[in-house]
Structure formats: structure tokens, C-alpha cells
Amino acid sequence: MSLRRFILNRILSIIPILFGVSLITFGLVHLTPGDPISQMVALNPDVGPNEEAQLRARYGLDGPVWEQYLTWMANVLTGDFGEVISTNRDVSGIVLARLPATIALGVFGWAFGLAIAIPAGIYAAVHKDELGDDVSRFLALSGISIPNFWLGLMLILIGSLWLGLWPVLAPSRLPLYHPNMLWYLILPGLTIGTAAAAGIMRVMRTSMGEEMNKDYVTAARAKGLPERQVILKHVLRNSLISVVTLAAALTASIVSGSVVVEVVFNWPGLGREFINAINGREVNMIMAITLFTGVFIILANLLADILYAVLDPRIRYD
Amino acid sequence: MAEDDNTPARRINRRRLLQGMGAAGVVGVTGCIGGNGDDDPGDDAGDDAGDDVDTDGDDDDDDEPADLSGIQEGGTLRIAEGANIDSFDPPYSTDTTSSSAQFFVFEGLVTSDTQGNYYPWLAESYELVETNDIDRTAYEEYMISVGADEEGILDTDAQVIVQHPEDNPLEDDEVRILTTEEAADAVADGVFGMQYRYELREGVEFHNGEELTAEHVVATAARYENSDVSAQTFDSVLYVEEEDEYTVSIYAQVPDAEGEGQLPGFYIHSLEQAELPGGEVDPRQGNTPIGTGPYELVEFEDEQYAEYEKFDGYWLEEMGVDSLDWFEGGDEFPDGPVIDEIELEIVPDDATRAGALQNDEIDVTSGLATATLDDFDAAEDFVVETTETGGYTYIQYPVNIEPWDDERLRQAVNHLVPRQQIVDNVLNGWGRPAWTDIPELAEESGTADAEALEERIRPQNEFDPERAAELIEEVENDGVEFPLEVQLETNADNDDRVQLVELIAASMEESGYFETSVETYEWNSYIARVLDPEYPQEEIIPCIGLSGTFNPESFCDALHNTANIGQCCNLTGISDEEFDEMVDAARFDVDVVDDQELRGERYDEIWDLLAERRYSSITHFGLTDAIMHNRVQNFSTHPFPESMYSFALHAPQEEQVIWLDDQDDEDDE
């Protein structure tokens, strides 16, 4: 199968996946008690059941769930993701406005994670069972164990309040592409990238360790190649295959992790919107963010598959 | 309405429909997205019990007028709010943060002080012209019939002003209603409860250059029809009529002792925006809000910040505070706010807001955890200002389930509610035990004698296990077996409230007469649960928070009126005809409209009845708090969080004005 056809097939497979995701998410949202109307008026003593029913009818929340789903789906197919019921804001507009900030944070965190994890993994593999290896494994375990919100708050405490190097609040007047944003992104990026780095580092270390015991490495060393060249040219490339797989899988956790990080660092991304939407039972917003996130994760996995083949020509697109 | 929270303020914004003085009849349930209701800021129970809390909103002696000689003009006040500004459109938003953001821009015909006294504002003067002793059946001959479907939805797009008291949309195919059109006919025939006449100030300019006239008031009232706040607006308002260019009359449906505050509860719109569809007075819809207020919105980024600048043509600065007939302040009191700009940052996370305040990135915020309040209160560079609010928390007994239908059992449990301990240990002292059922802000019209009321009621609300045991033994002698199993429950996302319920449960357990369990639910699940029609048949004691107003009714009616079963906030199905009649007579009666003392006496009878029948136990009243850098001078808090900043910036009714004392530093920067 050609690469082009493989990509096309994978893209086409997104459709049933997203359909399934939308169906499950829509069902789950409606299974949970409450809706935007109950949020808005159910606890207002001046609003009785009659007024509440009228409001629910006005916003199309009074029909059976399947009917609401079909209506929602019909609108989505025409590019209309609906409104945030409690505020009349256009969902598509909000998602498109927030998405760049979340992607920037996610990419930064992801890059940060890789930048830490790969060198650390290489070092740990090369210096296996030495003090440096123990330290790196301890740090990796810590990275996995420490909750994002706690780490974020600690970084604010140290970086902003003690050292005064970063502002506590994201510089909201600066556009995302402003160079100063790179500086601000360090703390949230570090927070979001730490857990990812920890996981990747452990896989990198294991993978490198396995590769270094293989015959071709022994042969390379026997030929008199410098150790640095053996590691970076031969072992690293083969070790990266499993890392790429994991890195793609970690995209999902980076996206979900950004929800907490965005709140802690006051970062105006989709994560904050998602929390508000869940609290407010804003089904249109929940659905839109879920679908966008789903597409993002699927594309990340597709990219991983392509990279897989680039790194290992033996892999075929089947 | 629910506090949110927001939160929110964790007043439910979601979850939160308190509209300040403009909706003085509204109560709000405090739920709280993300945490605490405004009634009980904070998450952490502390060990340091009972620090004295200044609840007068001012560290200084209130009898001493503020020293305004040091006022500095200019600067930017940087505020952090805990929730997004969901809307800039007053009739189409109900959350605290949105209202707070709107109050810089919009104004009403009247304003109020922190005690609930009303003063003419955009109206130069107003008077109660006429009161008629009628009830809502008086409109019968003007009513039209409309169909009602099986869900009780009426077949009309018009604003229902009055629905015939004898008709039930859920049971009847046709319902008699009065809409605005028929209300005009009734008024023309002299059928109305009350008439207030407002003489508008001449020369009041909107931000777009329009001059305020009666037409603006009428157009604004029309915009409130079928809006998100129409229910609380048109439970009292009958009709708004333009008499001449600068005179407008607002009619009430029935005699209403709250009419002075309730009827003019509109935030006046410009004609340019009065006919915009609901929710579209909003920069996100391409419409920067236009009002008569001292500040104009100049920039807004959704979920991030809003920026305001002083309006050059602000009417009060043009006319001077001396143009306010009732103003009795000194010459040094400024004609308008002295701070030039307001930056309102949206920072949902409490810890991040606290960090930003500490890092000097904002000047003032509110709604932080109680432990954090203690830290800031102790810090040299920061000031914590608080005042008692209308927020309160209560538990309600399952009165329809034996043996809870016995008031002696309910009185006994009430004696096991450790109110002082709740305030000391759960709220770290940031609150006040509810020794009676009304807070200070509602005392003026809610009792004839607040001291006598407390003296009479407090012994019945004191923690007294011995008295509880006596009462339970009486119940036991009548054949009830103890220990009784009972479940207490509340929303899980409010740590203070969870701890409060656990404390009450532990106290009940300790008595030996009860076996308790505590259940907590996510906020939305909890709302759905407690509003379920079957809920009153469960042997459960729910705990929830509400926001009351200056109106004493807001501390009893929502909880106990039969009409509120199945909705906010008569959760356990209390039905007491005597109470219903009494609470009606304390507000909607021609005799109490002009006689505050009589009204207070009627409320005293209500408090006595509730203390005896003890359907609910209010545990404490909360505080509105503001935590600020000490460069912010002369800040006084307002009982209602949504009015806090607009009031603090400039309020001639209490000679309140804030300024920043480091302008030179800022200029240097």
C-alpha cells in the first residue's frame, strides 16, 4: 500500500471514530443530571416548573435524547456547532479562538518533554545502574507521580513569587505569537511536559538498553567506531521507534493534562472552556471540544505511524 | 438563586441569580462551581478558632467620616474576578461576575446604600402616588385565555404579567393571563396595586450621546420582557408608563412593601441598544454596552480581561454631587470616581488569584479560601475588608416523614447544630452564627426590634445537648424508637459545606439518639436530586446555601412557602398555610406598605413561628470579602458581591470613594 493511500484510509477511518465518540459523549452528557437551564434558573425561587419548561423548550432541550442528537448532528454537518446556551456565544467561534492557545501549550509541553526525556533516557541507558541512572529514574518516577496542579502551583510559588522571574498571570494583552510568550510558556510547558518526559525517558532507557545488547552494536564497536557514533547513529534511531509510538499516545494525556494546567496558569485555552462547559452542562461546547480533541489525537497517531515507517523502512503500510 | 458560585464567587453563576438592588426579591442558592459559595468563602477548616472579624466593611470607626484629604486622582484599579463575564446584557445574565462588570456601565433610577435605604439616582425624585388594596384576581376582567400544553407551557409569546391565581397550566387546557397590553388597559381604568412616579434628571447623557428620557425607561422595561430575569421582574411590576418626556410611572400588581426597591429594578438602556435581541448587548456580538454609568468598556477579551475608562460626559460629574438633594457629604467628596481606568482580569483559580495579588499583578480580589484570608489579613502590605452579606447556609428537615413531623424532634436537632463551632472551626471565623433567621442587612424591615428578637430566639438556636435530650425523651415517650437513622447530604464541591454537614452529623451521633450518614454529590447532580418531586418523601436532611437580599422575605419564603415545593428552595415539601398567609401579609398588604414598624412586627411573628416549628436550621450568615493591596485606600465592602466594586469606587449615599495612593510611583513607571 502506498503512503498516500495509507494516509487517505486513516483519514477516512476518522469519520466512524468521531461518530462513535460523539454518540458516546452525547449520551454520557445527557445521562448526567442537570442541564444549562437547571443551572440558569432551577434555583431561582421566582422561576417555577412552568417557566423552566418553557426555557427548555426554547433551547430545544425538551425532546428525547435521540432527537436532540440528530438535530445536533444535522447542524454539525453544516458546520454549525451551536451556541453556549447560558451565554448565547457561538461555540465554533470560541473553539477556534481558544484552540491556538491550547495547541501552543500542548506543543510546547510535548517538545519540552522530548527535550528532557531523550537525553536523559540516553544517559540513563549508557550509564545503567550508576548513580546518574538512579537519579534519572527517581526523577522519572517523581514526574509521573506528582499531580500537574501541584507542580504548577509549586512552579508559580518558586518562579513567580520567590524568584520573581515570571508573572503569575499569563500576559493576556500579548498575542500568542509574541516572542515574550515563549518565556511565559516555560512554566506551564514544564508542568505539562514533566509527566510526559518521565514516561518517555523510561521507555527510552529500556529501548536503548535492549538495542545496545544487539549484535549490530557489538559489530559496530568491533569495527572501532567511536562509542558516541555507535550510540547516536545506530542505537538511537532504532530506539526511537518505541518512543515515537509512546509520544503519540502521550498526546492524549498532554491534551487532557492541559485542562488543569490552563486553570492553574490562567491560560486562555480550551481546557478552561471545557471545565466551564462540564460544570454548566453545556452540551454543545462539550461535544465540540471533544470532537476537536479527538481529531487532534487521531492525527497525532497518524503522524506517529508515518514516522514509524520513516525510522524503520521494514514497516509496511498494511 | 444559587451561589455560585462561582462560584463561583463561586456563586453559581452559574448558578446565581442575585441581581443586587435591582432584584431585591431574588434569593440565590449557593452552590458553587469549583467550590465555595460567597456566603462562606474558603476551603479550609482551620484550627485557629474565632478570630474577631471586622464585619463592618471598614477598619475604622463607622461613625467617623472617612478622611478624604488624601485623595489622589487617576491610576488603574486592577481587579481579579473568579469567573468569566458571561454577558454584558443586564436582562440576559444572572451571574455575579457579569453583574459586577455591568454595574460600571449601567445605572438604575434609584440606588441603595448598604442598609437597604433607597435614593433617587437617574431619577431626580420619586414618590409613591397611590396604593390600592387589591389582589391579583382584580385583573380577571382584563385577562385573556391562552392554551396550555400537557407540560404547562402557555401558547403565547407575550410576557405574562399576571396569571390567574385559580388557574393551573399543568392541569387546565386554558389559562387566564394578563400581558403588557391588557395591563395598560387595567392601569387606564385605575386597577393596579401601587403607582410610583419618577421625575428623571434632565441632561443625563449616555455613552453614545443620547439624553435620558422617559422613553428610555419604557424601552428598557420592554427589553426585560421574556428575558432571563423576567420572572423576578414581573412578579411585581405591572406596567411602565411614560407620562411626559422626563416623567415615568411604574405600577405594581398589588400593594408591595418592597415596591420601592423592586419596581425600579431596571438598568437603563440606550435606545440604540434597547431593541437588540436578547444577549446581544455584548462586545462578543459586536455591541459595546452603552449606559449612563461612570465608566465605558473600551476593550474586552473573552475569558481573559475587560478594560474600562472613565466616561468624560458622566452626568454626576457634570452636575456635581450637590445636585443630589439627599447628599449631605462634605465639599471634599468628589463628583465621580477618581480612578481613571479599571482592568478586570478573569482568573478562575483561587490560588492563582492569591498569587497574582501577592505578586502585585492585581490590586484587589475576593472569594479566596479562609486560610488564605487569614494570611493576607496578617500581612503588612494587604488589607482584608469584609461585611456581612445575605448569604446563608441551612439544613432542612424531612417534615413529611415520621417522626420528623414532630416539631420537638426538629427543635432537638436544632439544638445539636453547633453554630459557633461551625463559624470558628470551619470558616475560621469568617462568618457569623445565625442566632436568628435574618442577617443585619434585612433587620430594618425584617423586625421591629432586632435586639429583642435575638434575645427571644437565640436561646432556641444555641448548641444545647441537654435541652435536645429533654425534647427527644418527650418524643421517645410518645413511642418513637431511638436511635434514628438519618442521612445528611450536600454538594461535594464546597469543602466548607461538607465539613459543616459532617460537624452536624457528628454532633447528632454524639447525642446517642441518631445514627447518621453523610452523602455528597456533584453540584448539578445535587440540584437535580433536591428538586426532584419525590425528594420530600425521603428521610434526608439536605444542606444548601442561599443568597438573600435586603428583603426579609428572602430569608424565609423560598425555604418554606408551599408555592416553592419542587423548586427553589422548599426542598423537603414544607406546607404551612399559616406561614404562607403570614409571609404574604408581611409584604403584599396595603397596611405594611407605609408602616415599617407594622411590617417588622409581622416578620417578628414569622420568626417566632419558624423558631417554634423549626422546619429548617440556618447555620450561619456569610461575609462578602475583598482582599487588596494597601495602596487601595478607603475601600468599603458591599453586602452583595456584584455591587462591591461599583459601590467602592464611588457611592455618595455613603460618602464612599476609593483611590490609589501611589500614583507618583505609577507615573514614574
Image (spheres, coloured by chain):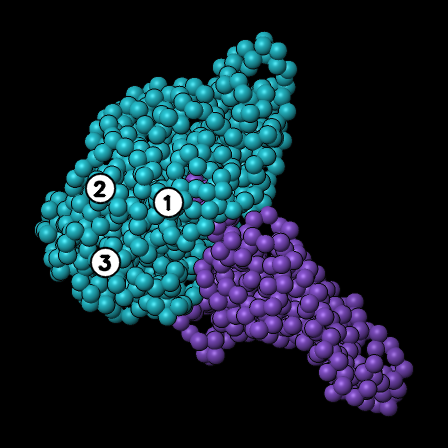
Q: Which type of secondary structure does the marked residue at label 1 adopt? A: strand
Labels 3 and 2 in the same subunit:
yes
Colour in which chain B is drawn: cyan
Residue A20 in the image, given as x and y percentages of width and height: 71, 65
Label located before the other in sequence (3 or 1): 1
Query: Where A178 falls versus B174 (above or below)?
Result: below
Q: Which type of secondary structure does the marked residue at label 3 adopt? A: helix
Give the quarter of the figure containing the C terminus of chain B: bottom left
- Crowding near the residue tagged with mark 2, few <14, some 14–19, many ≥20 C-alpha atoms within 10 Å: few
Mark yes or no: residue B261 visible: no
Q: In which quarter of the image is residue A61?
A: bottom right
The CA span between labels 3 and 2 is 25 Å
Q: What residue type is labelled 3?
A: His
- Residue located farthest toward the right when viewing the structure as drawn: A215
The CA span between labels 1 and 2 is 17 Å
Residue drawn where x is 65% and y is 72% of the image:
A295
Which one is closest to the eye, mark 3 or mark 2?
A: 2
Q: Which type of secondary structure does the marked residue at label 2 adopt? A: loop
The residue wearing badge 1 is B144
Q: Mark 2 lies on which chain?
A: B
Give the quarter of the figure containing the N terminus of chain B: top left
The residue wearing badge 2 is B189
Q: Which amino acid does label 2 sit on?
A: Asp
Q: Mark 3 lies on which chain?
A: B
Residue drawn where x is 55% and y is 25% of the image:
B400
Of residues B639 and B381, the one nearer the viewer is B639
Residue drawn where x is 14% and y is 46% of the image:
B125
Colour in which chain A is drawn: purple
Q: Which amino acid does label 1 sit on?
A: Ile
Q: In which quarter of the image is residue B541?
A: top right
Residue drawn where x is 77% and y is 78% of the image:
A241
